């Protein structure tokens, strides 16, 4: 991990970034870069894959949907090549977004995936190999059709949970309409890693010519609308009977948990990079996101892991103290105090039972990101009062 320590400065560094002030480093003149958008349905492992690509525990990950509510811009620079990877929220419908985060705050959850793609040069579609439905989500297909001028790769994640590789090949056929780089997927055995080569001229719409005139007219209208302005029913009507996308450049069979296939994926993205005079981020920079926000997101993800959904989604995390205490010739101590505000006393009572576990897990995340020894204190609060564990 590329974490840099600078002595006599009361600040934590993330790969050399201090409150937006970057460390000066000499950058070779022969630089290359690529901007990548990571998209997919909720809970397929987009954040975990992003972390694996950049080799850092940056994006918060949990077992529940909607852990990621905003785009996270991450970067890794190796051998004069910078990959800027944007992890986006899961593609959901308008009704779902409002139910999860409220009618006045759902905007980013809906719009950020498309914002990520508008600034991207390559799209990574993440699919969960364990999903029961063997098809690409209709919201994903709508985006791929709208942005078919961009190259894209399919990443089938969680392959460590699949016993037979033959099942993965069949899944790959379905999700690609049987084609990668314009060529039919064969029946030969496969290994975990890359599959297929790039043919830029191959740009077709899967199955559109076989649809009714009504659906084709609906398709034309949908191409003029961002996905976040389309209802769930609109995209399902046009793309609900399609299984995949035939224009992927490559397929990657990976496990973000074990790291299998990730090196091949990263190498492929680096091979797609283009010459640039200026990197978007400093060579030592991992993200522009503020450390407090990163901490709050990891705490929220652990709350989602530890508490029932009806409680976890309604709690509000607020980092109120962030202090660094220097030690002589030693790693500094990062003291963090976090309030978790609860609208119901019952929620606070449930939360205090798992606070030690959440603190321990968050401490590991912080230790992996910052060159400091973190001390984290979580406080459950109800009506501005701290709620403590009641002794039985």
Image (tube, helix red, strand yellow):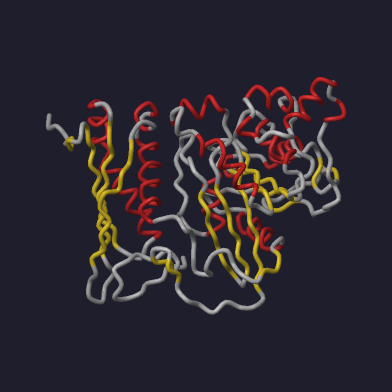
The vertical placement of 175 against 98, above or below, is below
At a point 35% along the width and 36% down the height, the residue shown is 306
Q: Quadrant of residue 342?
A: top left
Name the outermost residue toward the left.
Answer: 391
- Name the side, left or right, on which 41 lies relative to 151: left
The vertical placement of 305 against 233, above or below, is below
Q: Position of residue 70 (x, y in %)?
A: 49, 43
The mark tally for this picture is: 0
At a point 31% along the width and 64% down the height, the residue shown is 372
Q: Position of residue 390 (x, y in %)?
A: 14, 32
- Name the side, left or right, on which 18 lies relative to 282: left
- Name the side, left or right, on which 60 lies relative to 124: left
The vertical placement of 279 against 189, above or below, is below
At a point 46% along the width and 35% down the height, the residue shown is 64
Q: Position of residue 250 (x, y in %)?
A: 74, 50
Q: Position of residue 253 (x, y in %)?
A: 66, 47
Nearer to me, 129 or 205: 205
Nearer to me, 58 or 340: 340
């Amino acid at each position: 991990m590329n974490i840099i320590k600078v002595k006599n400065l009361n600040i934590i560094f993330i790969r050399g970034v201090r409150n937006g002030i970057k460390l000066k480093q000499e950058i070779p003149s022969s630089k290359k870069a690529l901007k990548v958008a990571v998209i997919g349905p909720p809970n397929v492992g987009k954040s975990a894959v992003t972390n694996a690509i950049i080799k850092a525990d940056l994006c918060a990950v949990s077992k529940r949907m909607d852990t990621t509510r905003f785009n996270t811009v991450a970067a890794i620079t190796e051998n004069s090549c910078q990959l800027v990877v944007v992890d986006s929220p899961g593609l959901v419908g308008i009704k779902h977004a409002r139910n999860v985060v409220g009618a006045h705050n759902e905007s980013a959850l809906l719009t950020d995936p498309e914002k990520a793609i508008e600034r991207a040069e390559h799209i990574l579609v993440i699919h969960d190999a364990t999903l029961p439905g063997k098809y690409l989500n209709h919201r994903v297909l709508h985006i791929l059709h709208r942005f078919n001028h961009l190259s894209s790769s399919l990443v089938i994640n969680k392959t460590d949970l699949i016993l037979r590789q033959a099942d993965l090949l069949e899944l790959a056929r379905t999700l690609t309409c049987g084609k990668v780089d314009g060529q039919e997927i064969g029946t030969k055995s496969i290994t975990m890693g890359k599959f297929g080569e790039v043919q830029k001229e191959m740009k077709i719409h899967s199955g559109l010519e076989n649809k009714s005139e009504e659906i084709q007219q609906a398709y034309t209208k949908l191409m003029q609308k961002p996905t976040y302005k389309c209802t769930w029913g609109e995209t399902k009507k046009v793309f609900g009977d399609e299984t995949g996308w035939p224009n992927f450049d490559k397929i990657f069979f990976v496990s973000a948990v074990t790291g299998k296939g990730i090196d091949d994926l990263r190498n492929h993205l680096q091979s797609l990079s283009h010459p640039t005079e200026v990197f978007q981020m400093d060579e030592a920079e991992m993200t522009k996101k503020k450390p407090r926000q990163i901490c709050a997101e990891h705490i929220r993800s652990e709350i989602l892991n530890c508490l029932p959904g009806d409680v976890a989604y309604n709690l509000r995390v607020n980092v109120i103290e962030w202090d660094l205490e220097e030690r002589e010739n030693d790693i500094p101590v990062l003291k963090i105090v976090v309030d978790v505000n609860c609208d119901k006393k019952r929620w606070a009572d449930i939360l205090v039972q798992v606070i030690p576990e959440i603190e321990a897990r968050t401490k590991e995340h912080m230790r992996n990101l910052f060159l400091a020894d973190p001390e984290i204190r979580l406080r459950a609060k109800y009506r501005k009062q701290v709620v403590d564990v009641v002794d039985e």
